[in-house]
Amino acid sequence: MPPWIPLSCCPAGYSVRIASITGPLAEVHRLRELGLRPGCRLQVVRCGNPCILRLDGHTLCLRSHPAVEVLVEPEEPLPPPKISPLRTAFGSLGRFRWRHRGR
Amino acid sequence: MGPEKSTSPLIILLLGNPNTGKSTLFTALVGVHQRVGNYPGVTVEKKTGSFLYQGQRFEVVDLPGLYSLSPRSRDEALAVEVLLGRSPGTPAPDGLILIVDATNLERNLYLVSQVLEFGLPTVVALNMFDLAQRRGIRIDIAELERRLGVPVVATQAHRRRGIQQLQAALARSIAQGTRPAVSPLPEQFWQEVDHLAQAWPHRQLPRPLLARLLLDPSGYLEKLFLPDLSTSEAAQLAQTKARLAQAGIGLPEIEPTARYQWIEKTLHGLVHRPLQEAPRPTERIDRLLTHPVWGLVVFAGLMFLVFQAVFTWAEPPMRWIDAAVQWLSTLVERSLHPGPFRSLLVEGVLAGVGSVLSFLPPILVLFLFIGLLEDSGYMARAAYLMDRWMVRVGLSGKSFIPLLSSFACGVPGIMATRVIDEERARLITILIAPLMTCSARLPVYAMLIGAFVPERTYLGGLVHLQGLVLAAMYLLGILTAVAVAWLLKRVWFTGPIPSFVMELPSYKWPSLRTVVYRVLQRGWVFVRYAGTVILAVSILVWAALYYPRSHEVEQAFVHQAHQLGRQLQSWLAQWPAGWTAEAECDKTVLTELANRLVAVQPPLEFLLDQTQFQLQQSIQKWLPSPPESSPIVQSATPSPHLAWQSSLQDLLQQVETLRTELTGAYQRQSLFGRLGRVLEPVVRPLGWDWRIGMAVLASFPAREVVVATLGVIFQAGPVDPENPEQITQLHQRLQAATWEGSQEKLFNLPVALGMMVFYTLCAQCAATLVTIRQETHSWRWPIFVFAYMTALAYLGALLTYQLASRTIPL
């Protein structure tokens, strides 16, 4: 079974199954009410945060609360993540740390 | 249809998810006669309309689209209130129409399952049935009806298909009365609900409400329905939740789990989707429009086109409106005696109405484009593209449409913030929307740029300095808005940003009828809201510029008036013989006026007005082209006569100058004139004198008023901003204006730049402030907006003036 990965890391064009959603109660509740429930199948149209997902034949734009983690199980093996040469050159000093601060 | 029965109308609620064609269905049901109002205490639009079916009137109330009955804000809690008939002003519903999207039954049935628990007579409208069929989705309606236990009607709201059947099913369903409530929630949960109902008999809370109270994750319902909850009752509530949790029924998780299980069971074997969904033709377009780079390029191009269209299309109607108002003012001026009433009509009412109406064309054009982009499905993509940038300053992707509307006018922009479901992003959007350069600022920029920014071009005539300054003002507004939003997010609205979910509707050709209808509706709301406020404040400002009024001011003009009378008399003395009867009649009137001028018969105001009017009439009627019989034409040497004729023009000009000087003198002693002089030390550092200060004060109802006020103060005569001749005259007057009692020029480039910066940043718009009050339900926010924007405007103008006057050589 392929490992679970965060939805925000899933590249565009892949189909995944939601494995679990964790985070603040009200936020998770809202997502589940909208149909983002464990076990449901969705397709990532545009990755990142916000991302575009196709779910039950409909297209949704989702920007999740910073504490919400949507873990998904890819239905097919994902390609190895592309690492830009710039990021390798600067290690974790560059954009990576910026991205994960604040917001 | 038989005659209407005397029974009272049945109240029907229309509920459904967003993007299911709910508004279209509503219009298809009730026609165009809809009433738009507000629910008390919330910023939710209340749309109602009615239809007649077999002699019975049905009153349909359209609730805003929602995904679930669990509220995330006070506005969303409204749906539960209305369903239970507990919203003041909306009677308890007799029946429900639930609209669901046939292409996405899974999610749509979630709300259906919640609403079915209320046990009200319900009909499900299976909308967009045609689209589902085209996508190869087959739905067994009869079986769905059996499993849901309520009538299901396939509809195509945009083609008005299935409406009759829907009405029939509704009437039948109501005739059958209440039906047993079905619920997928476990039996134990309902037992606990019944326990609570027994424990709190005095509260008279219906079962579905108690269930919703238990399932509510946000606490909004508790605040709304149990504001006086005692500690023992709160403990009881907590105990109930704990007991349920022990039994493996976690609240509120049980709700989505149980409901989606029920949905799966209900739809099992009912809905047949094609195994491989055919790729939609719009997918390629979507890939381009949501691309992080190309999407933004297309977006920028579209926005450029929209603005271009707003400027070019809105200009001619704005000119017509101005001309019409001008014509009406002249008519009133000619037919009424001068005095407070006429002045009120012309300078208060007509000026106010004029400014409201002249804002209308750009607003309508912008709304047309927004409507087209919304209806085609593009706006949601634009919101997605903008979201990643806007979230950094505490906004949401949905803030984009209100901010775009604010470029036409802040009032509809602030009203449009209702689409933002996240409270904080909505508030920040409201607070920064007035910084967008609205159409009321343009006349101010046009006046100041035209008069003081030199006409220089760069890059071979491609870039104009004047255009550059205008663009800089737009940019200044946007950048300030970004900075303010960022600061608000950092200082005031801290904390994590809640999730944001937005549906991206499928692309379609916009329906012109829907768009035009929406444009007109929004335009009307603007006229009603902004119109009343601008009109009221215009009248107040008029009063502050008119009163206190004492005729003593006229003493200073007695000598000038006397001289003018003498000039007119001597002109009349050269009157040639044998003119037409009409001209002779004018002569009598003019002689009378000249005599009164020589005697300086008070009130001078009145006398000057009459003289001005009579001279204008005479010049227009017979001076430029004397009738054939006139001796002037036959005369061999017409030149002395021509000189005599044209001297009347000079006389008219002198009368007009005296008249505006008198108006200026009256304004000087008015309330605002005095206030302006008191405030002079404050505005002095900006390079302004008390007259500019007064003009700025007087422009409180609407910024563009400053153009007309400056015109009066600097005696350029009443200024029609659309008349190029008068505008050049105003430019010359402004350029020539000096400080009182000195030869130093009052206006120069630094002062003009400072004023423009002031008008970019200031909150000189009563309608916007009142709208903020309406949308936030508190005076706190409009006061905050006014305070911060005025402070910014003052500092900006100060900085600009002080820097510019030191760097720009005069």
Image (cartoon, coloured by chain):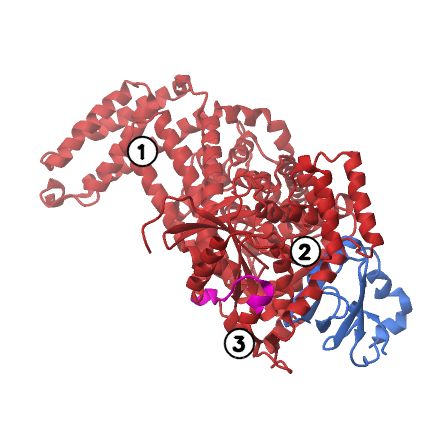
**Cβ atoms under marks 1 and 3 closer than 8 Å:** no
Q: Position of residue B80 (x, y in %)?
A: 62, 48
| Chain identifier of the red chain | B
- Badge 1 crowding class, 10 Å Cα cut-off, few under 14, some 14 to 19, many 20 or more, is some
Residue A35 visible from this viewpoint = no
Chain that bears disc 2: B
- Badge 2 crowding class, 10 Å Cα cut-off, few under 14, some 14 to 19, many 20 or more, is many
Residue B145 part of the magenta segment = yes
Give me the disc on residue B501: none
Residue B633 visible from this viewpoint = yes
Amino acid beneath label 1: Glu
Magenta stretch: give its range.
Answer: B144-159
Q: CA distance from mark 1 to mark 2?
A: 51 Å
The quarter holding residue B18 reads bottom right
Residue highlighted by disc 2: B396
Looking at the rendered structure, whether the residues under marks 1 and 3 are on a common chain is answered as yes
- Badge 1 marks a residue whose secondary structure is helix
Residue highlighted by disc 3: B133
Residue highlighted by disc 1: B333
The correct choice, above or below, for B302 with respect to B194 in the image is below
Amino acid beneath label 3: Gln
- Front tag of 1 and 3: 3
